[in-house]
Image (cartoon, rainbow, N blue to C red):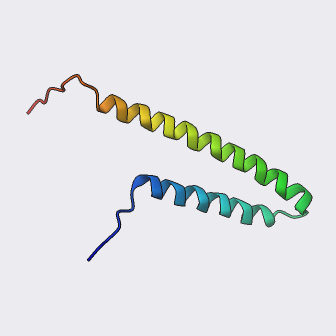
Amino acid sequence: MNLRHFGRAQQMWVLVIACFTLFALFLLLVPGMTFALWWPSMLAALVACAITVLAFQWWLGAVLARRDSSIPRTTWE
């Protein structure tokens, strides 16, 4: 059976899209919300989401690069 590996990157993008979609739907439930108010709010949410994803990717890359350093680790067993 050929199962496709669903890695962390794919999981992150599913989570980002799900959260963005839920925010859009919940924003529509706000009383008095019009399309003229909704789309700038969604644009601001998209910018905030992009900054957050980029910061997380930068941080995760730094953590993983530190783990793959050439300095050998000692194990205490």
The answer to whether 50 appears left or right of 57 in the picture is right
Q: Is residue 32 above or below residue 69?
A: below
Residue at the farthest bottom position: 1
Q: Position of residue 64 (x, y in %)?
A: 36, 36
Horizontal side of 2 relative to 42 (left or right) equals left
Please name the residue shown 91% across and 63% down the image. Answer: 32
Q: How many marks?
A: 0
Q: Position of residue 19 (x, y in %)?
A: 62, 58
Whether residue 23 sits left or right of residue 28 in the image: it is left
Residue at point 44% right, 38% down? 60
In the displayed image of the protein, which residue is found farthest to the front? 2
Q: Vertical placement of 52 versus 41: above or below?
A: above
Residue placed most toward the observer, 64 or 76:
64
Instruction: Tell me the residue at 70%/49% (across/down).
Output: 46
Q: Residue 56 appears at what percent x and percent y?
A: 52, 40
- State whether residue 53 is above or below residue 62: below
Q: Quadrant of residue 33?
A: bottom right
Task: Locate the C terminus and report the quarter of the image it occupies.
Answer: top left
Residue drawn where x is 68% and y is 43% of the image: 48
Q: Look at the image and tell me in which quarter the N terminus lies.
A: bottom left
Q: Nearer the viewer, residue 29 or 22?
A: 22
Left or right: residue 49 versus residue 12 is right
In the image as oriented, which residue stretches furthest toward the top? 71
The image shows residue 43 at horizontal and vertical percentages of 77, 50
